[in-house]
Image (cartoon, coloured by chain):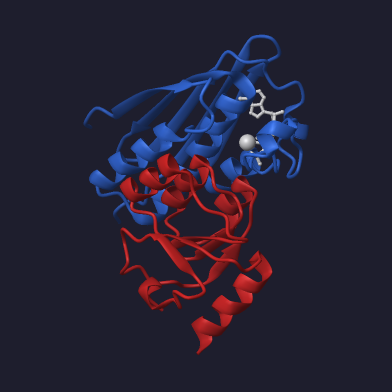
Chain colours: A blue, B red
Amino acid sequence: MSEPLVFQFDVDGNDFTSAGRASVQVKKLLRELGLPADVIRRVSIAMYEGEINMVIHANGGVAEVRVDERDITIILTDRGPGIPDVNLAMQEGYSTATRSIQSLGFGAGMGLPNMKRYTDEMRIDTEVGVGTTITMVIHLPQPQ
Amino acid sequence: MKISELRQDIFRPLCLPDPDRDIRGVYMGDLLSWVMGRAEEDNAWITIMSNRNVIAVASLISVSCVILTEDVTLDADVLALAEQKEINIFTTALSSYDACIALYRMLNE
Ligand SMILES: Nc1ncnc2c1ncn2[C@@H]1O[C@H](COP(=O)(O)OP(=O)(O)OP(=O)(O)O)[C@@H](O)[C@H]1O
Ligand SMILES: [Mg+2]
C-alpha cells in the first residue's frame, strides 16, 4: 500500500470575504489526481461548508485532507467556541449567524446538513470553550 | 443551449471567460449553502448576491454561469476573480422571477 497523500491548509479566521480558498485548492488538486467528478464535487461542497463554518463561527483553524486508495478524509480543526448542542446544530435551518454574516449570503443553517448529505461518514468532536474537530470521509469507488 | 446563445440585450455579459459552457437547467437562490446543496452542475445560477463568495461557490459546484438580477454588478476585484476562476457572469435589469421566465423561454424555444 502506498502512503496517503496529505494536504494541509491554514484557514484565516479574519477574512470571510475570501473564505473558501482551501476548498478551491483541494478541488484543483483532486482534479489533477484524476478522481471522478462526482467525488470531487462532494468533497468540494463538504469542505467549503466546513471551511466557511470555521471562519464565521470559530475564528479560523486548520484543514487537512488525506487521500488514499479507499477514501478521502477531511479533518477540520478549530479552537473556536465549540457547539453546545450538536443535534440542534445539525438541523436544517438552525443558525446562530449574525445579520452582517447573513448579508454575505451565509446563515441558512444548511452547512452542516450539506456536509452530512455529501459525505459517507461524518463525526463531530466538540467541547464548549475548547473547539471543534469535524472529520468527514468520502469513499472512493473501488475497482471490481 | 450554449451561454453564448443567450440574448445579450437581456442578459448583459460582465465576463465570459468560458463561453462554450452549456446551460442545463436553472437554479435561483441567494443563500449560499442552499445553492451549494441544491444547484446542479451546468445550471445557470440566478442571484442578487455579488460578493467574492459567490465566485467561490460558482467555481466549486461548476455552474455554467451566474446571472445577477436587478442590475446588480460586480466590484472590479470580484470581477477579476471571476475572470481568473473562469466563471461566466451576466447582469440583467430583470428581477430574479422575470429572469427565470426569460431563461425558460430561451431554453425552450
Ligand atoms: N466550527 C464551528 N464552531 C462553532 N459553532 C459552529 C461551527 N460550525 C457550526 N457551528 C454552529 O452550528 C450552526 C449551524 O451550522 P450550519 O453550517 O449548518 O449553518 P450556518 O453556518 O449557520 O449557515 P449556512 O451554513 O447555511 O451558511 C451555526 O450557526 C453555529 O452556531
Ligand atoms: Mg455553515
Does the image show residue B64? no
Residue furthest to the left in view is A2
Q: Nearer the viewer, residue B40 or A17?
A: A17
Q: Is residue B43 above or below residue A7?
A: below
In the image, residue B104 lies at what x, y percent?
57, 80
Report the front residue among A67 and B88: B88
Q: Is residue B89 left or right of residue B32?
A: left
Quadrant containing ligand 1 reads: top right
Q: Is residue A131 above or below residue B10?
A: above
Quadrant of the snapshot with the N terminus of chain B: bottom left
| Image quadrant where residue A43 sits | top left
Q: Is residue A108 left or right of residue A131?
A: right
The tally of labels here is 0
Relative horizontal placement of residue A35, taking residue B11 as reference (left or right):
left
The x, y position of residue A68, in whole percent, is 31, 35
Query: Is residue A20 something one can see in this rendering?
Result: yes
Image location of residue A14, percent across then percent down: 53, 20
Residue B108, relative to residue B99: is it above or below? below
Image coordinates of residue A40 in percent, x first then y, are: 38, 48
**Which of the 4 image quarters holds residue A138?**
top left
Q: Residue at x 55, y 76 (%)?
A: B103
For this rendering, which residue is in front, B82 or A144?
B82
Compared to A103, does B95 lie above or below? below
